[in-house]
C-alpha cells in the first residue's frame, strides 16, 4: 500500500502538471543540435550513464554521429541481433522488457494490476479496426532509454492501414504504467495494421514524455501534435498506381526518437507466446516472441 501511494504521489507531481508537447519540442531541438561540444558531451554522458555496449554498434565512434538523435537511433551490427528464421516463428520487434502479455478479453488489454484499457480506443476509436483482434493476443514491450530503438517486423506482412492518434505524452515507465489509468489509450500513438499469413497484425507505437517524434519507414517522421483529430492512411488503394508496401520478418518498420512502448496484437487462435515471454522478462530484437498456429 505504501509503495502504491508513493507511486501515485510521484506520478501526480512529475506527470500531470507539465506541458508534455512543449517539453517534447524542446527535447526534439536539443537532441538534433549539431554543435560538436554539445552533441559529443550528450553522447559520451549517455554511454557512461547507461553503459551502452558500443562493440555491437555499426558505428562505434561516438564523435562520428551528427547529433544525439542520430546516436540514439543507432544501427547495430547484423550479427548482434540474429532474427529467428524457422517457419512460423515470430520475432521480437524490439529490445526491451515485457510489460504485459496475454489475451484480449471482453475487448480489453491488461495494462497493469488494477488497470485495463479498450482495444477500440487503442486503435483510434474504431470498432471496425478492433473487431479482428477481439479475443486475440497482445504483448506490451517497454523500451528504456538504454535500449536499441529501431522497431522491426515480427513476421512478414503487407501494410493495410496506418492511424495517427493524438494525445498526451505521459511517461511510459513501469511506475506510470502502474498508476495512470488508460495510459496507452491516452498517449499519442501510431498504429500500423498489416495482413500476414497469420491473419491481421497490429503494431502500436506509443509516444511518451520527451519522445520528439515517431518514424515509420514508409511515412517518415510524425511529430507530436495537439487536438483530437485522428488521421488515417489507407494503403490498400496503392495497388492501382504503386506497389503494395510489404515488409519481411526482421525488416525495420520504424523507430522511436526517445524511449517508449510497442504493443503487438494478433487475432484469436493465431499465435502462442513463447514460454519465456512473461511480464518483466527481457527481450531482444529478433529473438523468439511467439509461434504461429495458422498454417498458410
Image (cartoon, rainbow, N blue to C red):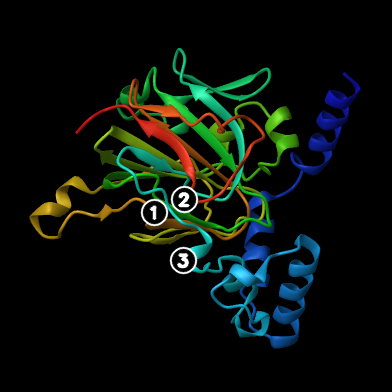
**Circles 2 and 1: CB atoms closer than 8 Å:** yes
Q: Which quadrant holds residue 90? A: top left
Q: Position of residue 188 (x, y in %)?
A: 53, 44
Looking at the rendered structure, the secondary structure element under dot 3 is helix
Q: Position of residue 262 (x, y in %)?
A: 52, 43
Q: Which numbered circle lies on residue 286?
A: 2
Marks 3/1: CA distance? 11 Å
Q: Position of residue 114 (x, y in %)?
A: 68, 17
Q: Position of residue 289 (x, y in %)?
A: 47, 38
**Which circle's residue, 3 or 1, is located before the other in the chain?**
3
The residue located at (75%, 35%) in the rendering is 175
Q: Residue furthest top?
A: 106
Identify the residue position indicated by label 1 in the image.
250
Marks 2/1: CA distance? 6 Å
The residue located at (86%, 25%) in the rendering is 5
Q: Which quadrant holds residue 160? A: top left
Looking at the rendered structure, the secondary structure element under dot 1 is loop
Q: Which quadrant holds residue 257? A: bottom right
**Which circle's residue, 3 or 2, is located before the other in the chain?**
3
**Which circle's residue, 2 or 1, is located before the other in the chain?**
1
Identify the residue position indicated by label 3 in the image.
78
Task: For the C terminus, give its image quadrant.
Answer: top left
Specify whether residue 214 is in view. no
Q: Is residue 9 above or below residue 40?
A: above
Q: Is residue 159 left or right of residue 167?
A: left
Q: Residues within 10 Å of mark 1 (few under 14, many from 20)?
A: many
Q: Residues within 10 Å of mark 3 (few under 14, many from 20)?
A: few
Amino acid at each position: 500500500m505504501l509503495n502504491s501511494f508513493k507511486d501515485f504521489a510521484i506520478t501526480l507531481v512529475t506527470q500531470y502538471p507539465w506541458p508534455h508537447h512543449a517539453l517534447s519540442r524542446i527535447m526534439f531541438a536539443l537532441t538534433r543540435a549539431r554543435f560538436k561540444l554539445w552533441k559529443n558531451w550528450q553522447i559520451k554522458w549517455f554511454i557512461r550513464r547507461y553503459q551502452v555496449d558500443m562493440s555491437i554498434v555499426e558505428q562505434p565512434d561516438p564523435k562520428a554521429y551528427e547529433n544525439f538523435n542520430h546516436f540514439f537511433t543507432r544501427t547495430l551490427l547484423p550479427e548482434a541481433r540474429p532474427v529467428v528464421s524457422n517457419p512460423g516463428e515470430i520475432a521480437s520487434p524490439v529490445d526491451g522488457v515485457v510489460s504485459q502479455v496475454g489475451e484480449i478479453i471482453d475487448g480489453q488489454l491488461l495494462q497493469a494490476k488494477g488497470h485495463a484499457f479498450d482495444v477500440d480506443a487503442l486503435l483510434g476509436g474504431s470498432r471496425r479496426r478492433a473487431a479482428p483482434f477481439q479475443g486475440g493476443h497482445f504483448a506490451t514491450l517497454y523500451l528504456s532509454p538504454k535500449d536499441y530503438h529501431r522497431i522491426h517486423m515480427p513476421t512478414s506482412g503487407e501494410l493495410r492501414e496506418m492511424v495517427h492518434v493524438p494525445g498526451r505524452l505521459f511517461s511510459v515507465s513501469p511506475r506510470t504504467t502502474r498508476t495512470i489509468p488508460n495510459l496507452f489509450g491516452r498517449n499519442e500513438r501510431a498504429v500500423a495494421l498489416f495482413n500476414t499469413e497469420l491473419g491481421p497484425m497490429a503494431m502500436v507505437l506509443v509516444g511518451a514524455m520527451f519522445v520528439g517524434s515517431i518514424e515509420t519507414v514508409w511515412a517518415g517522421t510524425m511529430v507530436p501534435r495537439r487536438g483530437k483529430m485522428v488521421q488515417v492512411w489507407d494503403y490498400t488503394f496503392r495497388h492501382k498506381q504503386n506497389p503494395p508496401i510489404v515488409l519481411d520478418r526482421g525488416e525495420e518498420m520504424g523507430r522511436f526518437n526517445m524511449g517508449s512502448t510497442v504493443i503487438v496484437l494478433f487475432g484469436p487462435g493465431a499465435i502462442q507466446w513463447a514460454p519465456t515471454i512473461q511480464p518483466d522478462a527481457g527481450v531482444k530484437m529478433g529473438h523468439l516472441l511467439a509461434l504461429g498456429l495458422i498454417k498458410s
